[in-house]
Image: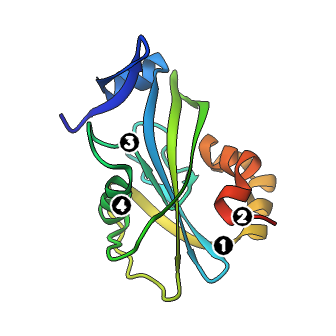
């Protein structure tokens, strides 16, 4: 049941295969996390073996919750699975929805629980090479500049967060 994610079919949540949800563009649940240290946000470069958007830069971590999984628990699980990060407290910010073509005939139509984490000490990070190949800590300005200069290396959802939901991610300007 691990590859089954909560998706809406005929207005009701149902467990659906993750790949099927993306092929059909079904609206489904997701979780996104932005981890901050000082004024810098952690972004990750997705592993080359990912079935969509490989090698592209994304937010600190994101995933789909398992069926009946609490979004905060999902965020904590995925931080550990992707980055080896434990002991942090994701703070729920809002729920938002977006639809994006992620290439290869796949669509992300997500209802996202958005979490942020602010930490005073750099977390211990151990990359899972099946998920993440690299990380960067960037200021908001540096991230915005990189996206403006090389938009093709960033995931569609990170660009959506930065253009439409930056105040939720970074707080009011």
Q: Earlier in the sequence, mark 1 or mark 3?
A: 3
User: Separation of disc 1 and disc 3 at Cα?
Assistant: 25 Å
Q: Are marks 4 and 1 in contact (CB under 8 Å)?
A: no
Q: Are marks 3 and 2 in contact (CB under 8 Å)?
A: no
Q: How dense is the environment of label 3, judged by Cα within 10 Å: few (below 14), some, or many (20 and up)?
A: many
Residue 104 visible, this angle: no
Q: Earlier in the sequence, mark 4 or mark 1?
A: 4
Task: Please report the residue visible at 44 percent of the width from the left and 30 percent of the height from the top.
Answer: 28
User: Separation of disc 2 and disc 4 at Cα?
Assistant: 21 Å
Task: Please report the residue visible at 81 percent of the width from the left and 66 percent of the height from the top.
Answer: 173
Q: Earlier in the sequence, mark 2 or mark 1?
A: 1
Residue that label 1 marks: 138
Please identify, in this view, whether the residue under mark 3 or under mark 4 is nearer the observer: 3
Tag shown at residue 64:
3
Task: Please report the residue visible at 34 percent of the width from the left and 62 percent of the height from the top.
Answer: 76
Residue 104, position as x, y percentages in the image: 51, 26
User: Separation of disc 4 and disc 1 at Cα?
Assistant: 19 Å
Please identify, in this view, whether the residue under mark 3 or under mark 2 is nearer the observer: 3
Q: Earlier in the sequence, mark 2 or mark 4?
A: 4
User: Separation of disc 3 and disc 4 at Cα?
Assistant: 13 Å
Residue that label 2 marks: 143
Q: How dense is the environment of label 2, judged by Cα within 10 Å: few (below 14), some, or many (20 and up)?
A: some
Tag shown at residue 82:
4
Q: Are marks 2 and 1 in contact (CB under 8 Å)?
A: yes
Tell which of 8 and 63 is nearer to you.
8
- Secondary-structure class at tag 3: loop
Q: Is residue 76 left or right of residue 112?
A: left
Q: Is residue 55 left or right of residue 89?
A: right
Please identify, in this view, whether the residue under mark 1 or under mark 3 is nearer the observer: 3
Q: Earlier in the sequence, mark 3 or mark 2?
A: 3
Q: How dense is the environment of label 4, judged by Cα within 10 Å: few (below 14), some, or many (20 and up)?
A: many
Q: Quadrant of the N terminus?
A: top left
């Amino acid at each position: 049941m691990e590859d089954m994610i909560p998706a809406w079919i005929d207005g009701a949540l149902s467990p659906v295969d993750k790949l099927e949800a993306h092929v059909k563009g079904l609206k489904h649940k997701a979780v996104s996390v932005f981890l901050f240290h000082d004024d810098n946000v952690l972004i990750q470069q997705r592993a080359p073996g990912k079935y969509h958007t490989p090698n592209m830069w994304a937010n600190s971590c994101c995933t789909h919750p398992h069926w009946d999984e609490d979004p905060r628990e999902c965020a904590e699980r995925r931080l550990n699975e992707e980055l080896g990060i434990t002991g942090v407290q994701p703070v729920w910010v809002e729920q938002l929805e977006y639809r994006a073509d992620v290439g290869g005939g796949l669509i992300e139509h997500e209802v996202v629980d958005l979490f942020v984490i602010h930490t005073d000490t750099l977390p211990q990070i151990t990359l899972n090479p099946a998920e993440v190949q690299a990380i960067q800590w960037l200021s908001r300005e540096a991230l915005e500049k990189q996206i403006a200069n090389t938009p093709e290396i960033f995931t569609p959802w990170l660009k959506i967060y930065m253009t439409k939901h930056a105040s939720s991610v970074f707080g009011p300007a």
